[in-house]
Image: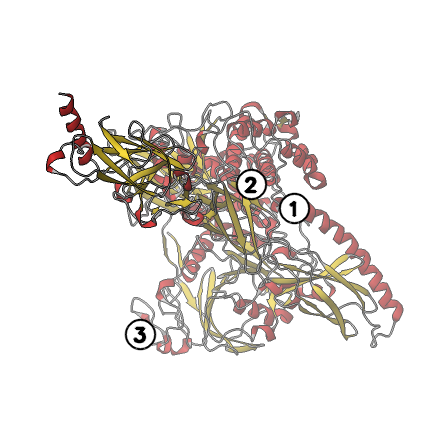
Amino acid sequence: MTMYLWLQLLAFGVALLDSAALVTGQGVDTTTNATTTRKPACENKYEGISVNYSYNGNGTYSAKLAAGDEVTCEPLECRQNQLHGLETCTNHTVEIKHDSCGDPPKSLQLEVPPDPGHFKLEVCVEPENAATSLCLIWRKNGSSACDANKITYKFQCGDYPRQNSSEQISSNKLEFKDLEPESNYICSSQVYYNNLIITNQTETIKTDFGDPGVPKSLNCSNVSATDAQLFWEPPERTSHGFTLCYWNASDRVCLNETERTYTLRNLKPFTRYDVTVHAFVNGRVFRPGADAECKFKTETAPPSPVRGLEVLRKTDNSATVTCKAPAYFNGPDTEDYHLEVKIEDKPVRYYSRKMCSFVVEGLQYSTQYTFEVYYHNGEHRGNSESVSHTTSYNSKALIIFLVFLIIVTSIALLIVLYKIYALHKKRSSNLDEQQELVERDDEKQLMSVEPIHADVLLETYKRKIADEGRLFLAEFQSIPRVFSKFSIKDARKPFNQNKNRYVDILPYDYNRVELSDVNGDAGSNYINASYIDGFKEPRKYIAAQGPRDETVDDFWRMIWEQKATVIVMVTRCEEGNKNKCAEYWPSMEEGTRAFGDVVVEVNEHKRCPDYIIQKLTVTHKKEKATGRAVTHIQFTSWPDHGVPEDPHLLLKLRRRVNAFSNFFSGPIVVHCSAGVGRTGTYIGIDAMLEGLEAENKVDVYGYVVKLRRQRCLMVQVEAQYILIHQALVEYNQFGETEVNLSELHSYLCNMKKRDPPSEPSPLEAEFQRLPSYRSWRTQHIGKQEENKSKNRNSHIIPYDFNRVPLRHELEVSKESEHDSDASSDDDSDLEETSKYINASFVMSYWKPEVMIATQGPLKETIGDFWQMVVQRKVKVIVMLTELRSGDQEACAQYWEEGTQTCGDVEVQMKDTNRSAAYTIRAFELRHSKRKEPRTVYQYQFSSWTAEGLPAEPQELISMIQNLKQKLPKKNSTDGNKYHKTVPLLVHCRDGAQHTGVFCALFNLLESAETEDVIDVFQVVKSLRKARPGMVPTFEQYQFLYDVIASTYPAQNGQVRKSHHQEDTIEFDNEVDKANQDANCVSPPGPLDEAPEGNKEDGGSKPASGSEGPEHSANGPASPVLTQSA
């Protein structure tokens, strides 16, 4: 039995002689099989013999033969079938035999493996590729006698079979690619010798940081002249920092940042910058990501002083002033250079032009002048450079002492006038300055400001506005911009940030308007709007930013949910080529538009000079409620910079808004662009007027503090804070003077009653409240010695700020041959190149369009008069005087029956038609430098004595209705900002008394037709500010009321607008045309050539077949004279 078991073991060992032996290092057994020659007699004796190798750690192996004790081995020392001390990489022959076998011994070849310590597994990946690949390599530490061809390797990494080597390979290196960055991989590898594992190693390897990606939401904002703020969000992958680069055309700066915001400082004004931000990681290598980009342009700043200022003598009393451009324009380089001519720091002249080359003429002899030149880039004035120059002695003068005396007297007068002018200029300049608020963040800086009682409101205002508004500034700067105790978290959430127009104007969390959630979307309940308390009414208003394109749906959702019925918009959609607000309503052509679930339909669109009213109907798709009426009022007279010139405009807006609001309405929604500056100003005026009416006192300071506690930055600049006070003073001084036409007759009846009879009537008291505005602006030009003879009345001289400049003939000749409605003059050279004429620009109802109010021409100014008509493209001249008043000349006859020439202007009278009250003359004007003629109509009203009132007021109304057909159609959106085209010119003897009444009546009729209201007080007040002597008497003031009342008589409680029937006129010409049709005027052409057939037919025909240059779009070719029925 024992022999049988031994034979089985031997057979098993022989079968395993060819199998692999595992070598794993010291102490690890390795087994191999020996191949024997089987003999029949001992076939089972040597089978199953195997060899196990075990590394000893000292460079030797031990081998154990797995066979029974009956098997012996030779010639090596073999005890219990074990061999010791076998050197690596050596071959040995072992003979094995069994005593029972007669055959020769079996030879067993032993091949000892190499030393496992000679192999070391290392990571060999290149640093640039370490993010997505890794590499393993077995390195040998020493030489070996082993056969290198028998050494093979196997590698395995992670759970990616495509990366693994499933078989033994001869290469000691393998690279794994397309791995995930910043990931751990468990890698193992084995070394085989002759298919026997001799060593095995496992490593945990982490791939490097990968590409960080692109930063998100890069935003360039809060751009000023020298600073800009950058904001961005980190990329989705790991990043260790950011590289920010910004550059312009000449400079480039790059820097590394770890924060997500950065403020660029010391930038160049009015310069376009490009900005890139990319993230980076610092792993085995520095690895940058892709760039996020944004662009911006810095604001303008004051330019640097001009260079190379030089004065060259031209004549005894004239000089040429030249300079080089400033080193830095800090704005457009196409604006004007300005020259101030001073005597002892007192300005006496002012010039401006595109090039820095000035010719100054008419200087005083033997006088030292200071010439100050600066460049104005359109928004900012640069510092002045000055140079002194003394004019020469007048070689033609005969009496030196007289010249000296005149100069001394002029200097003394100019000093006084300059001080008055400088004081007024300092006071008025505050309206245009938008001073930055002082950064404060706590309520300790608040001042104690007492409420102002109505009876001292004007005196308090004058006290605070004195010294350049120092007290107003102190109050305003003491109010914190933002109250830090109120959190602003919701507005700063990532999903709400793109809904904010400005990053620093955000609603407080506690009183923001919350919308209903939409489908659980994060941020769907957010809108940049805040509840604002009224005088004593909580949440009377909602102050909101101007909707952006992406928030228009949210805006209308707020209107619907808050049940708002009035929207007050105090901005234009675009101002200064900048988007201020999206146009969030449908046009009249479009009719209806859906904004999400809210549908808005426009029913009525009414345009007025200062505002636009739209009647809307709002419905909700998912609610069965009937549509709601919403009134949208857009105030259009807030200038791009500063505040409205007259606080009365905001009081008028308030009346319109309150007319549409009622107790049951939701909050009044008020917005501008940011929803703080103009919005806060309007709300402040409305609330404080309510307080003034209720308590006879106001606390403007306290209410603005309250506004700031409910929404940051409300009433944004000092000028707006002052404007609230000005509106209160205006209201407290003058009250409500606007009257609806439907109430005019009863109102006027009450205003004329004296109670008691000894006291002035309310209408007289209203007239007495009118400010005179005497000498409120300078009149330097009209009072110059060389211009005094051009004034018919020494008390009626135009103010400098709105006088009509008249260009010289030489400059007019440079005008284009093409006769268009564009200006024929350039007002930028106002003081340098213009001649003087006693004429003023007067604001018309359709602002900013104007009329010209001027005196009756003198004989020596007839040429200037016609030059003004040509240069300003006048269409209609209104003459309100006879040529003589008693034995005095009231107006020179500035026309002739045929043709007359006035300088470069040829005036030909083409037609004359006369009615009982007024005469119409048609003139054809030709300029020697133009090809096309121009037709001008003159309306001379003859039923008005020099000292009285029009004998037939309705004739005057009839004339106004008739001449309006000759004027261009109104365009209240654009107007004529620079007064280049003035279609209407009005004159009487002095250009004030009759002219003022006519201009007031003209504007009142426009107001009545457009708005069904009149405001005689404000219209006259505006005219008095524009020209001295306008509407000076109570009789004229009352006349305006009476004429409007008779023009719009009341009938059954309703206003009935008068209809005019055609007037009867008498032709005044060399031939008898008494039987011609009196309903119209023949177009330009000789009157004596009119056909006799005009006696009976229904209308006159053009003489000589000429229609003249008029177009039918401007009305009939012939002026139609009408009178009231």
Residue 1: where, in percent of width, then height? 13, 20
Instruction: Establish if 187 lies above or below 302.
Output: above
Residue type, numbered disc 2? Pro
Q: Is residue 626 visible?
A: no
Residue 1041: where, in percent of width, then height? 50, 43
- Please say if the residues under marks 3 and 1 sit with CB atoms less than 8 Å apart: no
Give the residue at mark 3.
Answer: 1093
Query: For the residue labelled by badge 2, is the local secondary structure a helix, a strand or a loop?
Result: loop
Residue type, numbered disc 3? Gly
| Mark 3: few/some/many CA within 10 Å (<14, 14-19, 20+) | few
Cα distance between the residues tagged 3 and 1: 64 Å
Give the residue at mark 2.
Answer: 647
Judging depth in this view, the residue of 304 and 1028 nearest the camera is 304
Residue type, numbered disc 1? Ser
Cα distance between the residues tagged 1 and 2: 14 Å
Give the residue at mark 1.
Answer: 428
Judging depth in this view, the residue of 490 and 87 nearest the camera is 87
Query: For the residue labelled by badge 1, is the local secondary structure a helix, a strand or a loop?
Result: helix
Query: For the residue labelled by badge 3, is the local secondary structure a helix, a strand or a loop?
Result: helix
